[in-house]
Amino acid sequence: MEFQYDDLDYNYSYEGNITEPQESIFQQNTTCVKDTLCLSLIVVSVVIFLLGFCGNALVIWISGFKMKKTVNTTWYLSLAISDFLFCAFLPFSITYMAMEEWVFGQFMCKFTSAIMFVNMFSSIFLLVIISVDRFVSVRFPVWAQNHRTIKMASIVVFLAWVLAIALSVPSMIYRDVGTHMGKKICLNNYASPSHSHKIVALSRFLAGFVVPFLIIIICYSVIISKLRTNRMTKSTKPFKVMTALVAAFFVCWLPYHVFILLELNHHNYNHNILTIGLKVGTSMAAANSFLNPVLYVFMGNDFKQKFRSSVLSKMENAMGEEGRTISRYLSRSSSMDGRASTHI
């Protein structure tokens, strides 16, 4: 029987009866307040919560109520909602780390873990959708101008959320509350079948990291090639925000996936190193939820304009300028195609 213990979704594995005290990586010789790493992670988590909750709420307010609804604002609104939901449930994990005991019951144990993976999958799926959208707009401008509608964008976003929720179901199934050394803990219980742990970990790695990464790389390779061919390098500015979002996602989530895969064979690695790596990796993954609104602000305009404009106008510009530039590009491409057809 295999159990895993996490604070957020840290995976500390061992085999045995969880109700019986034993020497393992669960042994708690010091409290979290006296543990420098634990205390640091709590402080980082609190900062992530405050910045992520407020920042994403601001993005939701601007893109959902202050800006004209477009395909671009639909993408970014959904991305902000995903990050906002994750940040809203982060206090449960912070409390768990501080108290070193789960006091919120079995349902919240399952639900808070599932929210993390809904955030992970929905974020990467939306980044893939935005990349494909940019690819279609550049590679097939006429088709995009005729079919790239808000209704279609809403349908695609809905399907992405459904798929993200479906892939997060294992968290609801295998997450459980147990007792160890007299304390309630929230853990992953991969009791049966024994290979379920590997299936879940590998499926998350492939569906939430490898495959999306390959799709995004392919889309961006085609986009860059197309822009260079048409000598439209000035139009690459709108892609800076998207590039930063993708880079931030992969930098934040890569350590988490690496240590999750190493944890599959935890008996071959030092438990202390594995434990620290999983804790830091999970905190880095959580940090991605507040980076997105920060990128909206600081990549919307050039340096001087950042100080001349308000925070709201910066964020509106970051999300709105992409739609204006793409529209100009589509119009220009359409007129070029029109002139070409008259010579046939």
Image (cartoon, helix red, strand yellow):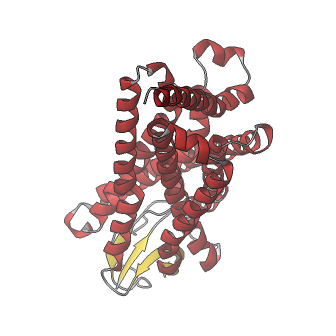
Q: Is residue 15 above or below residue 95?
A: below
The residue lying toward the viewer, choosing from 139 and 20, is: 139
Q: Residue furthest left?
A: 268
Q: Residue furthest right?
A: 65
Q: Is residue 25 visible?
A: no
As drawn, is 214 to the left or to the right of 330? left
Q: Residue at 62% across / 61% down in the picture?
A: 158
Quarter that holds the N terminus:
bottom left
Q: Residue at 53% across / 39% down in the picture?
A: 142
Q: Residue at 67% across / 31% down in the picture?
A: 315
Q: Is residue 63 above or below residue 186?
A: above
Number of dots carrying numbers: 0
Q: Is residue 195 above or below residue 284?
A: below
Q: Residue at 39% across / 38% down in the picture?
A: 220
Position in image of residue 47 (x %, y %): 60, 43
Position in image of residue 295 (x %, y %): 56, 33
Q: Residue furthest top?
A: 304
The residue lying toward the viewer, choosing from 194 and 275, is: 194
Q: Is residue 194 above or below residue 302?
A: below
Quarter that holds the C terminus:
top left
The residue lying toward the viewer, choosing from 298 and 128, is: 128
The residue lying toward the viewer, choosing from 161 and 227, is: 227
Position in image of residue 43 (x %, y %): 57, 45
Position in image of residue 260 (x %, y %): 34, 61
Q: Is residue 5 visible?
A: yes
